[in-house]
Image (spheres, rainbow, N blue to C red):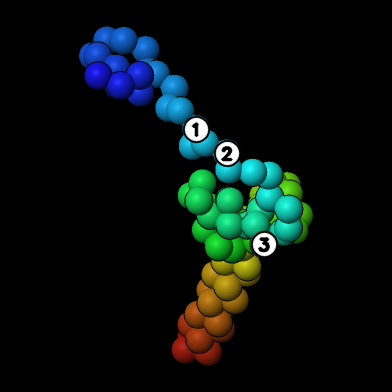
Amino acid sequence: MSDAMTQPGEPAATLPLPPVKSKPRTSREFEHALRELGFSKTEARTIASHGFKGLADADSAEDLSELTALIERNSKLFERIERQLP
């Protein structure tokens, strides 16, 4: 049985990290390494450019644009309803 496997009732084992080939020398290599770790292309590019904080900022901006779209949609809906009132 490998070290990464646990028996029921045992604390979870830590999974071994993949071996490091070499440090990334370019931003593109860094993005590629992040992709291999499971980050999306957009996430890897954002992290490489702005660090992990940039990833949180991008999520916040995405949330705000979704909220803005919902507010605009609801405003238009209310305007239509108001026009139909006597």
10 Å crowding of disc 1: few (<14), some (14-19), many (20+):
few
Disc 2 marks which amino acid? Val
**Residue at 35% in and 19% down:** 3
Disc 1 marks which amino acid? Leu
Which-is-in-front pick, marks 2 and 3?
2
Can see residue 58? no
Q: Quadrant of residue 27?
A: bottom right
**Residue at 53% in and 74% down:** 74
Q: Nearer the viewer, residue 52 or 20?
A: 20
Residue that carries the numbered disc 1 in the rendered image: 17
Residue 20 image label: 2
Residue 75 image label: none
Disc 3 marks which amino acid? Arg
The alpha-carbon separation of the residues under discs 2 and 3 comes to 16 Å
Q: Position of residue 29 (x, y in %)?
A: 65, 57
Locate residue 2 relative to residue 54 in the image: left or right: left
The alpha-carbon separation of the residues under discs 1 and 2 comes to 8 Å
Locate residue 46 relative to residue 8 in the image: left or right: right
Q: Indicate the secondary structure of the residue bearing disc 1.
A: loop
Q: Nearer the viewer, residue 52 or 44?
A: 44
Residue that carries the numbered disc 3 in the rendered image: 28
Mark 1 or mark 3: name the one nearer the start of the chain.
Answer: 1
Q: Indicate the secondary structure of the residue bearing disc 3.
A: helix
Please determine whether, in this image, residue 83 is positioned above or below residue 19. below
User: Marks 1 and 2: CB-CB under 8 Å?
Assistant: yes
Q: Nearer the viewer, residue 86 or 83?
A: 83
Can see residue 66? yes
